[in-house]
Image: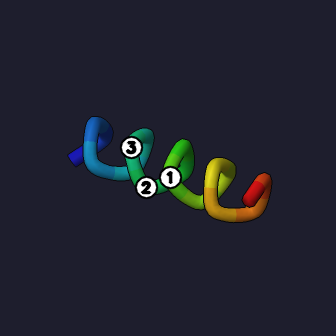
């Protein structure tokens, strides 16, 4: 699902920010 991929990418970005 594209939604899942988008959320995963956003989550990864947040994780990298922390």
User: How far, Cα to Cα, is label 3 from label 1?
Assistant: 6 Å
Q: Label 1 neighbourhood size at 10 Å, few (<14), some (14-19), many (20+)?
A: few
Q: Nearer the viewer, residue 1 or 16?
A: 16
From the viewer's perspective, tell me whether residue 13 is left or right of residue 1: right
Q: Which residue is mark 1?
A: 11
Q: Quarter-wise, where is residue 3 in the image?
A: top left
The residue sitting at 75% across, 63% down in the picture is: 16
Q: Is residue 15 above or below residue 17?
A: below
From the viewer's perspective, tell me whether residue 9 is left or right of residue 1: right
Q: Which mark is residue 1?
A: none
Q: Which residue is mark 3?
A: 7
Q: Quadrant of the C terminus?
A: bottom right
Find residue 5 and report its horizontal and vertical position in percent. 39, 51
Color style of the picture: rainbow
Q: Which residue is mark 2?
A: 8
Q: Are marks 3 and 1 in contact (CB under 8 Å)?
A: yes
Find residue 6 and report its horizontal and vertical position in percent. 43, 40
The residue sitting at 38% across, 43% down in the picture is: 7
């Amino acid at each position: 699902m594209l939604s899942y991929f988008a959320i995963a990418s956003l989550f990864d970005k947040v994780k990298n920010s922390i």
